[in-house]
Amino acid sequence: MSADDEKRLAAEAAAELVESGMTVGLGTGSTVAHLLPALARRDLTDLRCVATSPATADQARSLGIPVEDFDSLQRLDITIDGTDQVTPDGWLIKGGGGAHLREKIVAAAADRFVVIADSSKPVEELTWPVPLELFAFGLASTLARLGEDVTLRPGTPPSPDGGLIADYRGPGTGDPAALAARLEADAGVAAQGLFPPALVHDLFVATGSEVAHTSFG
Ligand code: 5RP
């Protein structure tokens, strides 16, 4: 079974958690690309969805899933998103698609944040790169302060919020809480891709045709 099949199976399992009338956060990436048709097939009614990227919004609307701006909803019942890495205790690295700023906001707004993954995503310990979004204002000074461990991601356009996507490749991923605090402490960093376990409620990982479901606190 291919990684893409595993992504589809994990996404289909998570889609079953969504019920009519829910407010739903939609993540970004190739795993979420399988979630959207799985949701559409369920013929749910009265969904109110927010998307973490224009690509997700476009795909959702093309499937008949309603997407609205994230300015009228204060809370979401559920957010479902992929990940680049996940540790046994629930730390994530996200932002391979450069959408981690919006993804973190939409995850934080959800009563239940559900992560979907193929079998390549679980790791014993996180490793770089850690994606960053940097404010455009004062970018040269931010990059000078962050040093040679941070580089702009080549060929990547600014985010919908105007930030520049970069990656951190340096020490500290073995202590993600300390690294997250260090990266967030820089005034030029709009978002960093380490998501703490406190944010994560459920994890669906597909390995072959089996989907394992882990619930966190
Ligand atoms: C995008 C993300 C994605 O969720 C992450 O990169 C996983 O992507 P994929 O589902 O394509 O493997 O964080 O910013």
Image: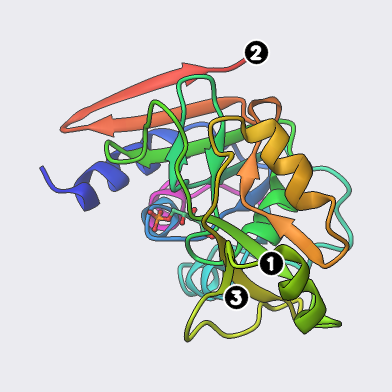
Q: Would residue 21 appear left or right of 9 to someone viewing this image? A: right
Q: Dot 1 corresponds to which residue?
A: 133
Q: Secondary structure at mark 1?
A: strand
Given this view, does label 3 or label 2 mark the residue nearer the observer? 2
The location of residue 45, given as percent across then percent down, is 61, 49
Q: Secondary structure at mark 3?
A: helix
Given this view, does label 1 or label 3 mark the residue nearer the observer? 1
Marks 1 and 2 sit apart, C-alpha to C-alpha, by 29 Å
Q: From the Cβ of disc 1, is ligand 1 less than 8 Å away?
A: no
Q: Quadrant of the C terminus?
A: top right
Crowding at mark 3 (Cα within 10 Å: few <14, some 14-19, many 20+): few
Residue 76 appears anywhere in the view: no
Q: Which residues are magenta?
A: 36-47
Q: Earlier in the sequence, mark 1 or mark 2?
A: 1
Q: Residue at x 51, y 56 (%)?
A: 169
Q: Residue at x 52, y 74 (%)?
A: 55
Magenta segment includes 201 = no
Marks 1 and 3 sit apart, C-alpha to C-alpha, by 17 Å
Verify CB contact (< 8 Å) between mark 1 and mark 2.
Answer: no
Q: Earlier in the sequence, mark 3 or mark 2?
A: 3
Residue that protrudes farthest toward the left in the picture: 1
Q: Secondary structure at mark 2?
A: loop
Q: Earlier in the sequence, mark 1 or mark 3?
A: 3
**Residue 151 appears in which quarter of the rendering?**
bottom right
Q: Quadrant of the N terminus?
A: top left
Q: Is residue 82 above or below residue 154?
A: above
Crowding at mark 2 (Cα within 10 Å: few <14, some 14-19, many 20+): few
Q: Dot 2 corresponds to which residue?
A: 217
In the image, what residue type sits under mark 2? Answer: Gly
Crowding at mark 1 (Cα within 10 Å: few <14, some 14-19, many 20+): many
Q: Dot 3 corresponds to which residue?
A: 54
